[in-house]
Every structure is written in structure tokens, then in C-alpha cells.
Amino acid sequence: MRYSNLFGKTTKTIPKDIKLDSHKLLVQAGFIKESTAGRYYMLPLGMLVQNKVVEIVRQEMSQAGAQEMITPVLHPLELWKETNRTNEAGFELMRISDRRGAEFALGGTAEEMFVDVVRKYPISYKDLPFNLYQFSSKFRDELRARGGLLRVREFLMKDAYSFNLGEEDFKVEYQKMWDTYMKIFERMGLRTVPVLADNGYIGGEYSHEFIVESEVGESRFLESEDGIYRAHEDVALFGLEPVNPDEEEKPMEIIEQPQWVKTIEDVQKHYGVEANRTLKNVVYRNFQGDVIIATIRGDLEVNPVKLEKVLGETVPLAPATEEDFAAIDSKPGYIHAWGHQFVIPRQATTEARDCRVIYVADRSLKTVKNMIGGQKEDTTDSINVNYGRDFTHEHEGDIALAKDGFLTEDKSQRLVAKKGIEVGNIFQLGYHYTHLMSGATYTDKDGAQKPYYMGCYGIGVGRAIQTVVEVHHDERGIIWPESIAPFTVYLIELNSKPAGDEVYSKLQQAGVEVLYDNRSDVSPGQKFTDADLIGIPVRLVVSPRTEGKIEWKKRSEKEAVLLTFEEVIAQLKG
Amino acid sequence: MRYSNLFGKTTKTIPKDIKLDSHKLLVQAGFIKESTAGRYYMLPLGMLVQNKVVEIVRQEMSQAGAQEMITPVLHPLELWKETNRTNEAGFELMRISDRRGAEFALGGTAEEMFVDVVRKYPISYKDLPFNLYQFSSKFRDELRARGGLLRVREFLMKDAYSFNLGEEDFKVEYQKMWDTYMKIFERMGLRTVPVLADNGYIGGEYSHEFIVESEVGESRFLESEDGIYRAHEDVALFGLEPVNPDEEEKPMEIIEQPQWVKTIEDVQKHYGVEANRTLKNVVYRNFQGDVIIATIRGDLEVNPVKLEKVLGETVPLAPATEEDFAAIDSKPGYIHAWGHQFVIPRQATTEARDCRVIYVADRSLKTVKNMIGGQKEDTTDSINVNYGRDFTHEHEGDIALAKDGFLTEDKSQRLVAKKGIEVGNIFQLGYHYTHLMSGATYTDKDGAQKPYYMGCYGIGVGRAIQTVVEVHHDERGIIWPESIAPFTVYLIELNSKPAGDEVYSKLQQAGVEVLYDNRSDVSPGQKFTDADLIGIPVRLVVSPRTEGKIEWKKRSEKEAVLLTFEEVIAQLKG
């Protein structure tokens, strides 16, 4: 293709709010263009990359025996009602009605659609397992879209759904997809690490995110020093040592405390103790309207995802509001570790009952004696508080956030905190959808109807593309891996039009994908700058100085050499 | 792929309302499955076909220099407001709002989006022309969906938009796309004829539909006997001979007429004349609420599309309602060819004016003298009515529908009426969008900003696939052309599992796309039936009877022969 005809040329005008290098480079080099916030045009250069990524994913999924198909974009809303996902999807669902009044959801994921098409057919145990996937536009009504293709409202996703005979059968598929994902990302030039992750409302132990380490990533995970344990911070486990095991339990007292003592730091300063001797309460509200008080050792932070798991919440908890504090007659910083009740009764959202105050204790409370805090008033507080003696909560468990330097669960080594970009995930759905959707069964050997066991496997195509740019670029531009580069060769002609045209034509005849910078109205410097910015793997230059030969330079290298046309072809084919 | 693992197997339970063979076969053979009316799952077999069709279109579009990209599915509604298409799109637009209140249209076509992305860049005359295309889901809120993939509410469309320097430049692109479309459809196994078509609200002379002749098609067109003139019935021109040129004009009279004389047929019977001696009035209403009375020779029918063109209407006319008849103090069958006015004044929909009665005369009125009809009351009618003498209409033109057997425009031959399925169209957009959308300009040589001239080129992928089935099938099933068949070979194993497995494995190693019917729980007859139904080009059978060889049979032929494996490969590669 001739650069002069290319739509979506390099540009210098970049919106100021673009922060990430990868986002900036994709815009600047003419791969993507924003339509409205969080919705992008994939320009011709970007489309060439996307088509190559899609083909890699397709090949590897097919190699793993998965079958491609596609569902309508508009999902009948009644399917989402069957699985209660109109309220609880975890991302904002967009809805639409047609002129006849039929209601639809714009799919954010497609579990219901795939179960629906499968249950339309009689399935025998002999048909199982199978794995169905599609490439399709997904919609998330995100409040904030940012970071270019990293967090968008509309995106191309490869989503796969496996239908298995049971958990054992699923495990085989899970491993197969794990291996397939490693191959896919490797072929794209991404080094991913599978990280144990939260499985949301599904529960269960099989859930991994494929993460590319990156400082700009939003996924935080903890890795053991030996690299064997890797878990998303939402679920990472860690070991706790006792703080003061040899201390005697003292009688709890309510004592006077200066009014300036408000935060954990104030308490540390006032009493001259470490934060791990203090007690902290953090307040949330659930979907029903109940108030949740999480009590934890003062040096630790509450991990809301772990807290949700302990409580069995299927909808994410929200921070408590002023209204919640007022309803239990308290205010931030003055929450008691015991005794709060609703003083203004409140009806639960979906059940005919009053809301409750639910106390949850982190296991860390058992590692420290004679804590400070628990019943704070304006000028008093409690000291020598001991969990299990002075108060006990209805729920107990690990609700603490793991952090860099914490011990591993077996206390043999330290955890290292890392950041990265999630480009794919695999997780078990188990019987969740098959139990909620009627008729989602197969006929077993004995003639009985049994629900199939399911798994789910996603790759965000656009996000993966931008991640490639994030990890493969320098100060001058993108450095595309050959496997997904929009073209193989960027051919520059400098004051040598007939020679340049001839090389272009011969390269095309040889089946090489060439972007030919044939512009006559820009400087040589501009051509070199654009070549580096766009990042095509091989740059060729034809100019009077190359004297009948061709200058060859790889984008990833500094050295340029003069080669004959035949040598260029040999290098490209090699 | 092993048939046992294939999702979407052949089925015998076909919904009763399926009428078309092609629709029935695609469902029965496991290529598609309905989600809700007019929205289909493309099953794995169908997806393999679709991917091949997409690749053919992509190759040929790329060969023609077009550049693939993709727009978001959700189009900002303000773009559609810029071009007044929220009311006048000609198909029902689906709208949706996000949680922040931003409004979007679900794209039915994407002119606005492509103009919008192009106008975001500075475009020089040196960049033009270029042609951008995408494959994307399109949405039409059709009242009635029917015929499987032929008329749906959601479908994959390849839509291309060319940006040209002017009309001359556009004509070159138009011819290129014409040639490209012929190649694309030929490669898919479709023989298409380009048929001159209506250009809707755009106007202009460049508009062709690519039609596959078929009795089940909804597109009606007229072809001259020599095959040179082909036009959709919406726009087909024809020649008119004078009916009674030698007759003297007689004085018009209002005469008594029996009350049973109501229709044109009654008039013919009562007066003993041909229908071409009578005068007919047909009543419509426009978007504004005006009443349109079209007066035409009694043997002809009004063509609403031609009528819209004569009136310059951009929104389709609707048949008059009871309310319309009442508003002009009349009723069906008793419309006068002159003199009607609104007796109940009515305000125009979008303009501050009263509605009007607008009379339009077909040119046929000038071909006949002394017509019967024009001022019909209960027991009277007018005779010897002469257009131009007794009445003259505000608008005159060709508003008649061409029919089988009519003369061509030059009266040298007859027109033949044909039916077919439209699988693609190409048409000029001219300056329509660039004039309506601000900033849709390029910088010309002289530095002036000029609007680009546009063209638009569509292919309905699903409709094309079903059309292939409609023209390539027999009573036993589909007969896929090799170019888009889901697999090349359907391998059947009959009581010869090890031998069958070996052939399957060797075919795969040789790079042949094989669907391997390895089922052990169905009869040989069932396997042969399914092979014929699914319609893969080559059927191979391994059984004790084939004695170490392989039975080879093409789906399109009757003869089966025994070949060695090497001979099979040679045949396949040949």
C-alpha cells in the first residue's frame, strides 16, 4: 500500500488528557481514533493488526478443538432475567427495546446466549465436551473510560464457553485453555503470567488472569519470591505472625483520651505503640441496605472482595454513606467494634425484612492482645481490648489485603507486589448458569438429564493490542512484533521515484506486505520519523546514496546495512 | 473436526413457518439457529462458511485498493441528527442511551460515522481518492422478519464508502467496485446481474443492485429481450404508444351511470372499452400530511417510487387513510381528478403551513383521448375527458409501474419481468452527506476547502450465504461451492474405525479440511443422508467394502469411484 493513499496518517495533535505512552502512540501513529469517550474507530493500520491478532487467536483456539460461532449482538433480556444478571452483572448493562416492545441487553458477556443456543439442541454425553467461542463487540456502560483501548465502553472480545460433563472434564479443558492462552500471547509478543484471581459471583477455585507486568497496569498482584505463588490482590493469601503472644491479657478499660486523637496514627503517637496494637473499623453497605462493620488490626487494610466472600455477597459492597452512619447513630472515626444497631429502621431492598448491622472480624484480631480502640467517643476510648473475650463477631475470616513484603501463607518467604495489565482470563462457571437456566442439561449414559459443567475464557483483543505497544516501544515510537505488525516492510524512497517504485512492485510480487512511503511533499527526516513512529519491523530505504542497493534496518536495531534486492528477500524469508 | 464433537448437528425438527428451501436447509443442516425473530446464531458450520465469504470479500476489496477499518457499533445520535436521518432513514432506527444520558443509534448503515472519522483529519487532494470499508453488525427494526437470513433485524454487512475528488473520480471507483462485486459473487458461486435501482433520498443516476435471479427473491426487475437494459421495477422506464390518436376530441359530459359501476373493470364492462380508455385516481399521503392524488391511465399502476421522485419526497409516501379521505370530503372509488381541497384543515408535520391536496398526472394521460372517469359521484361520471383541455395537474411525469411485456423505452423490444435476491448494491452518495455535515472537506490544489464526493458499496454477508444455498441445492440438501464450503471433505467411516481414523489423520496432515463422521451410534444411511444435507463438496467413504481404497464422490455428481489415498490427494489438489 502506498502511504499517500493510506487513511489515518500520523498526527502531531494529540489530546492533552492522554497519559499512557501506548495510547498516545496508537493515536499519533494513526492506528486508532476516538469516536466518543471509550469508543474507538480502528483505523486501517489498526485493523491490519487486529485482523492478525484475531487470526492468531482463531488458529490456536481451533488447534485446541474449540469451535467458532457468533451470537446476535442484542440478547433477549429475558435470558438475563433467568440468571438475575439484570441487577447483578457487575458491570453496567445497556438495554434497548425494539418497536414491538421486545427488550434486549447489549451483551457485556454472553453466558446466557451460549447456554440458550446449546439448550435448543438435544445434547448427549457423547457430544460433550465442547468449547464454543466468538469474536464480538462487547458493551460496558463504564462511568469512566480511560487509557485508550485499556478501559473502554465497547470492545472486541474473544469469549469462549466450555460445556463439560463435570468438574474433572472441565479441569482438562481449563488446562488446555491455559496452555492455549500462553501460546496466543507468546505469538503476539506478550509475556504473560497466569495469576490466581477472584471468581466473582461464581465462586470456586479455578480463576486465572493472564497478566502482562507493567507499571501502568491496573491489576495488582502478589508474587512469592520464588515466583511459584501468584495471586491478584483481591484474593492473595498471606501469613500472620502473633504480635504480642507473651503478653498477659489485661482487664479492658474505658479511659480518657485527648480530643485530638482521631486516627490510627494519632493513637500510635499518643500511646507510643505500633499500628498493629490498634483496632480499626471500616464500614460498608450491601445491596440490601445492611450496614457491614469490618473490624481489623490497625496496621492492615480491609479487602472488600475477601469481605464479600466471607459474607456470601453476590453484588459488590459499597462504602457506607453519610446516611448509613446516621442510621446507626455514628459518624466516621467513631464506629464501635460492638453494639451498633439501626436507630432509623430501614427496609431491605429485595426482601421483606428490616436491614441489619453485620459485624465481621478479620482473623488478625486473634494475633494481638490488649488492643487499643473499640468504643471510641469524643474524649474516651477503650484499651486492653481482647477479641473473643470482650467481643466476638457473627462472621470471622480473612478479610485483609495482602501487601508487598507480607509473609507467604506458609510464612516461608515474602510476597512481592506487582502491577500489570490483564489481557485474558479463564475461569470456571461450574453449574451456576446451568442451574439457573431451565433445560440446560445433557442426557447421560443412564438416560438421566444432568446439567453441564461450564467454563469461560476471555481475551480482550483491543486491550491486548495496546499492551503490546505498552511493552514494545521506545521514545521514537512503536516496535511491532513481526507476527502482528500491520506490514512487514516500511519502504522509503528519497528522490529516487523510479527505483523506489520498482522495489515496491518487486516486493509486492514476492508477496511481502509493504507500506511504501512515496510522499514527495515531506522531508526525508519526516519519513524516518514516521517509520519509527509506526514501528513496522523492517525499514528499507532507496536513495541516490544507496547506489542501486537498498538500505536495510530493523526497527528494533540500530545498525543499517546495504543489501541487494535478493539479499533483502532472503533476509525477509529467513 | 470429528462430527461427534461438532456443535449444531443436523436436525429433523424444523419450525413449520419456514417456507424457503434455503432457510430450511440451513436450519436443518445445522448452519444457523434463530435466537429471536430475525436474529440468528451462526453455528460452527455456518461460521466456517461466513469466515470464508468474509475472506473472499476482504481479498477482493483489498485488491481494489479499499482499506478495512471498523467503527463503533453505537453511533452518536447527534451525527444522525446532522443529516436528518433520525426521521428519514428509510428503515427503523434503534436508539439507546447510556447511564450518563449520551444518546446513540444502533447503526443501520454508517455514512455519518465514516464521514465523521474522515473529517477528524486534515485531508488534502493528494490523499484522495480512498475507499474505506468494514464488516460489522447492522440493525434494522423491521416490522416483519422472514425468510431466514434474507430479511433479518441484525446482520453482518460489508459496507464501503469512497471519498472522491468529484464525480469523474467517483465514476472510476464505481466501475472498480462494479468489477470487484462481479468477482466476489462469482468466487462465491453466485451469478449476479447488476440492475439499475432507485437511489432513495440521494437521487442521481448511479445506483445498481447485484441480483441473483430466483423465484423466491423479493426484488422485481425488468430486462429487455436483448439483456442490455435491466432496471428494478421501482425505476424501470418503458415506452408508451398512443391509444386512440386518430379519434376526435369530443365535448366532456357528466352522464348518468348505474350505481353498480364502481371499479375500472365495471367501467370496461358497462362501456365495452379497454381499461386504457379509462382514468384512475390513486391517493397517498406524504410525511407532512399532504394528500397526493395521482391520476393515471386505467390500465396502468402507480409506481410510488417514481411518484416520490416527481414530487421530490425524501420520505416514502404512505397509502391514504380513512382520515385522509374524510379530510378531502371523499371516499375510495369516488376521488375526482380535479377540485379536491381539504375540508378539514390540517397542519403540516414539520412546517407552519396548512396541508394541501397535490395532484400529479402520469404522462400516459397524454396518450389517450376522450377518457371515461374523473368526476365520479354515486350515479354519475364524466366521459370524453381530455387531459390538458378539461384538467391539468400541477405535477406531470412518469409515475407508472413497468410490467412484463411492456415496450422498452425506445419501443424496439419488449420488457421481461424477473425476480431475484439482492446480494449487494453500489450507489452514489454524491455531496449529500458532505453538504449536511460540517467540516467534511478536503484542501484542493488552490488551497480552497471543497466537499468530497462520495459513493457507498454494500454486501449483506448472511443474505449472500443463504442465496448460495437457494441456488445450489437439490432435494437432498445443500451443494456448497468449494470456495465457501465449511469443509472440503466429508469423511464417512463404516465399521472401519482404525482405517477411518488413519485416513482422517492423513488428510489432516495433508492440510485438507475434513469433517469426519465417526459416529458409531447411527446407521450408514443416516451418515449418507447427513453428508448430502450438509453438502460438503467431496464425500469419502472408508468401509470393509472399499477394500483398502477410499470411495470418492462429489456432492454435485452421481458417480462414486474407488481411489487410493494418493489419488484422493491428487484429486483434491488438482
Image (tube, coloured by chain):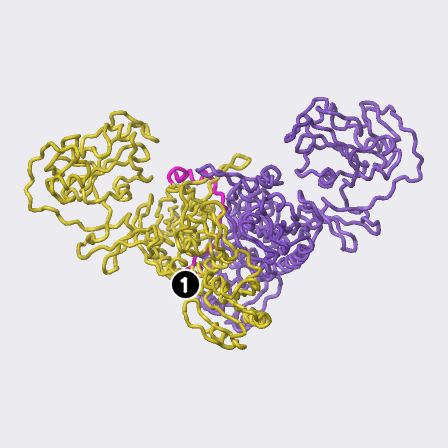
Chain colours: A purple, B yellow
Element under label 1?
Answer: helix
Judge whether A405 appears above or below B574 on screen.
above
Instruction: Compare residues A214 and B231 and report the one nearer the observer.
Output: B231
Q: Amino acid at mark 1?
A: Arg
x then y, percent, for residue A108? 57, 44
Q: How many marks?
A: 1
Residue B170 in view, yes or no:
no
Question: In which quarter of the view is residue A339 placed?
Answer: top right
Say left or right for B174 vs B249. right
Q: Residues within 10 Å of mark 1 (few under 14, many from 20)?
A: some
**What segment is highlighted magenta in the picture?**
B61-88
The chain that hosts pointer 1 is B
Say left or right for A2 vs B496. left
Taking the spot 15% from the left edge, 42% from the top edge, the residue there is B268
Judge whether A518 appears above or below A467 on screen.
below
| Quarter of the rendering occupied by the C terminus of chain B | bottom left
Taking the spot 9% from the left edge, 46% from the top edge, the residue there is B245
Q: Which residue is mark 1?
A: B187
